[in-house]
Structure formats: structure tokens, C-alpha cells
Amino acid sequence: RVDDLDEIFDEGFSSVLIAVGAHEGVRLPIPGANLNGVLINTHFLRDVRLGKFDNGNRSENQNSLGKNVLVLGGGNVAVDCARSAVRLDCEVQLACLEPRADMPAHTWEVDAAEEEGVQVFPDRTFERILADERDHVRGVECMRVSSFHFDQSGRLHLEKEPDSEHIIECDTVIFSVGQRAGLAFIPDDAGVGLTDQRTIAVNPNTFATSRPGVFAAGDSVSGTAFVIEAVANGHKAAESIVRYLQELPLEPAAKPDLPVVKMTQAEIENRISIGEIKHQSRVPMQELPVE
């Protein structure tokens, strides 16, 4: 475990690659966000995977999971939370900012969740989480959204429908509105620059940070993205580290452009007709049954 970036250099290392990934879930800064019964997506999925929920739906290190779960978020991780909660014998609802057709999650994932009984509430913004007399979640006050956009700094701007306040009742809320990299081990005076989105700022060609010898790749640079992107960037960062240790210029040598084959739809269909190309269906993804 690394708690302080500077300590690594004190131990004699000449270079460091930061590739911690985006494992910290985000808790929206709304009233009631810290009530009993409020969970975070990454913690919830980790505990499900580790089998920490028993038949009573309790976790060793979390609030109890109730029977009426509301997931806040519209991405693939939010749908994972919802479908996991269904498999824990919960009634599950999911509310998100986006319209149903524009949810970040894969359409097939959302369709599968609805088939399993998850009720989806699109076009919602979350005003506050309501508490009962025990300071436990009893619902979320929402409003309908007519439009929204994010500016260049990532700040959300939205238009709410007048008089659209309503309450979605639940006894457990799971925040699933994104993940970010845990960068607490980087001291403020470490010389590693961050972006406005709280990711590590790097040279896009070399993945070098503003501090000599420190490189970064993966979700700590890009934000949540695909695994293959993290793998590719890790390879590029490793090549840069080798050049750094050999005291060579960090910028990689220019690579020749590879030829790109472009075919029209008619050409593709012709090649199919003469047997040069064959259609191949996707391999169906296996899914665990709800029960």
C-alpha cells in the first residue's frame, strides 16, 4: 500500500507509474447524502462480489440493505448495482438525469434490468434524500428535467420542469453517479498537476506528469473509460519510462501511417456474396439468473 508518493522516491526508485484506476464512488452533495441506508456503488458491488451479504441482506461493513432500493445514476455501473440488488431479493428502482434513450448504460443492459423488474425513472434530478424518525432513508425528493448540459469545466446546467416535485419511496439509496481515482496519496506539494476534473494532467504523447519521473495512465488520467484504453496507455507510458531511465528524449519517434482499407456497403455485400466475407454473430453473453 502506498500512502505517500514522496516516500517511493525516498526509497530509491527513479520513476513511478500512477495507474490506480477510478475506484472511489461519488456521493452527490445533496441534503441527506450521509443518512443511514445510503450506499456507494463501488462499495456495494465490492461487498456483493465478496459475498458479504447474508440472507438478511446485511453487510459486515455497510448499513443494512433494505428491501426497497433506489439506484441514482444511469450508467453501466448503476445498472450493475440495480441488477445485483434484484439478486439480493430487493425491489429495485433506478432514477437518472438522462432520457431513457440517452442513458449512458448499454441499451441491452437497461432492457435486461427492466425485464428483471427494475423500474427506471429517467429525466430526474435529485433534490434531497428524506429521513424517517430514525435518521434512516425513507425516500428521495426528485424533480423532472426538461434539458441539461455540462459546460467545459464539467459544471452541470439543467432546466427543471415547474411544479414537478415528487418523492420516490425507498429504504436504501445507492449513489452511482460516477467514479474517480483515489489520489489522496499524492501530496499537494508533490508537483503532480491535476485537471479541473480531478484527474492527473499528463503529456498525451508521453504520459509524463508535471513532476519528472512520475508518469500516469488509465482512469487516473482519462476518467472512467474502457479497459483496453488503459492497457494501451499503459504500454505507451512504459515505453516513456524506459526512455526516461535511459535519459533519452521522452517524445516517441514518429510512426509511419498504416494503410487503411475502406469499402463501401456495396463492396462489402459483394464480398459476402462471393464468400470472401462471412457474417459472424456475436457470442451471447451468459447471465446469472435472478433466482
Image: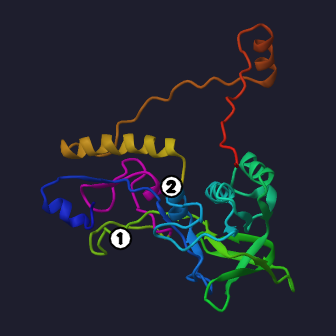
Whether residue 153 is visible to the viewer of this picture, yes or no, is no
Report the amino acid beneath label 2: Gly
Q: Which mark is residue 184?
A: 1
- How many dots with numbers? 2
**Is 212 inside the magenta-drawn segment?**
yes
Q: Quadrant of the N terminus?
A: bottom left
Report the amino acid beneath label 1: Ala
Mark 1 is surrounded, within 10 Å at the Cα level, by few (under 14), some (14 to 19) or many (20 or more) other residues, namely few
| Residue at the image point whose x is 54% and y is 70% from the top | 26
Where residue 68 sits, quadrant-wise, is bottom right
Instruction: State the residue position of label 2.
Output: 51
> How far from the left and from the top, in percent, is residue 181?
44, 63
Q: Main secondary structure of the magenta part?
A: loop
| Residue at the image point whose x is 54% and y is 63% from the top | 44
Residue 174 in the image: above or below residue 162: above
Whether residue 224 is visible to the viewer of this picture, yes or no, is yes
> How far from the left and from the top, in percent, is residue 4?
25, 67
